[in-house]
Amino acid sequence: MTAKRVSYTLDSSLQSVNTAEETAQLLAAKAGFDEDNCLRISMAVREAAVNAVLHGNAYDPNKKMTVAFENTGQALVITVTDEGRGLDVSKVPDPTTPENLLKQSGRGIFLMRSFMDEVRIRLLAPGTEVTMVKNVSGPAELHKEASK
Amino acid sequence: MSMKSMTRQVNGITIVDLSGRITLGEGSVVLRDMVRDLVTKGQRKILLNLGDVTYIDSSGIGELVSAFTTVRNQGGELKLLNLTKKVHDLLQITKLYTVFDVKDDEATAVAAFK
């Protein structure tokens, strides 16, 4: 992989969520991740984008979501930023505990953490920045890189 | 591809064949409205066939959970049929696999309703 960064500023809409997901799928494949990891990455990005558009910006047409993809050579680093009130991660309950298992919502961050190697959430003023890292560490990815 | 659903009856069980994506927006709303409609009409034994569901996000998972509790709260049963590997893995990760009654065979699933 060669280091490369692309960034998209998107409206707070469901269409933007789909755009972020599809772009993640495309760039993950381009970075050499196998099909399963491409799906995991695109799902994590979708969850982050849903949080940004729905919970962060609350579909406010005056607020934007930014999605940035950076291919460092060792990892795909994806940052999703919104302009909302800010997410206090400490108040997000574990959706897998018995008392939360049958709740309708609250699984987005859990899925991001499940699918990515690293997830960092930072409060901005205003907004929330979610940084997700997927390392290029599997043999399949390394093999693909070596064959380029 | 957005979600589509077809409903049929087999031995008193309502089987809903779902296809496409169950995601925030159209897919999850279609699922919610469809289950509520069935329950309103008195259907209490519902089998969701997810064999052609290509993708579910956390909103879609939430709608499956909501459908499960809606039917259960009315004294009914909701089971899942034909999970793809992707959906199976997702339910495993979220620890919901053991919450739902999941079947791989339609006849077995139909027979499993009380």
Image (cartoon, coloured by chain):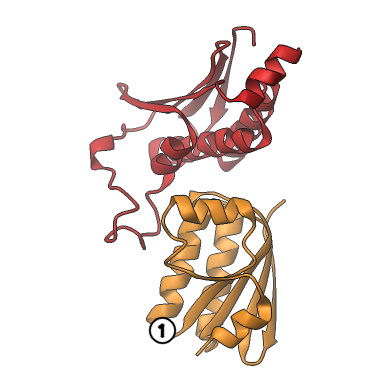
Tell me if A43 is positioned left or right of A86 in this view: right
Q: Quadrant of the N terminus of chain A?
A: top right
Tell me if A90 is positioned left or right of A6 in this view: left
**In the depicted view, which residue is nearer to us: A65 or B67?**
B67
> To which quarter of the image does residue A147 belong?
top right
Q: Is residue B98 above or below residue B11?
A: above
Q: Which residue is drawn at 60% across and 87% down?
A: B111
**Tint applied to chain B in the drawing:** orange
Please give the chain letter of the residue carrying mark 1: B
Answer yes or no: is residue A55 visible: yes
Q: Residue at x 59, y 35 (%)?
A: A42
Q: Which residue lies furthest to the left in this view?
A: A90
Q: The red chain is which one?
A: A
Q: Quadrant of the C terminus of chain A?
A: top right
Residue designated by label 1:
B74
Q: Position of residue A56 (x, y in %)?
A: 39, 36
Q: Which amino acid does label 1 sit on?
A: Gln
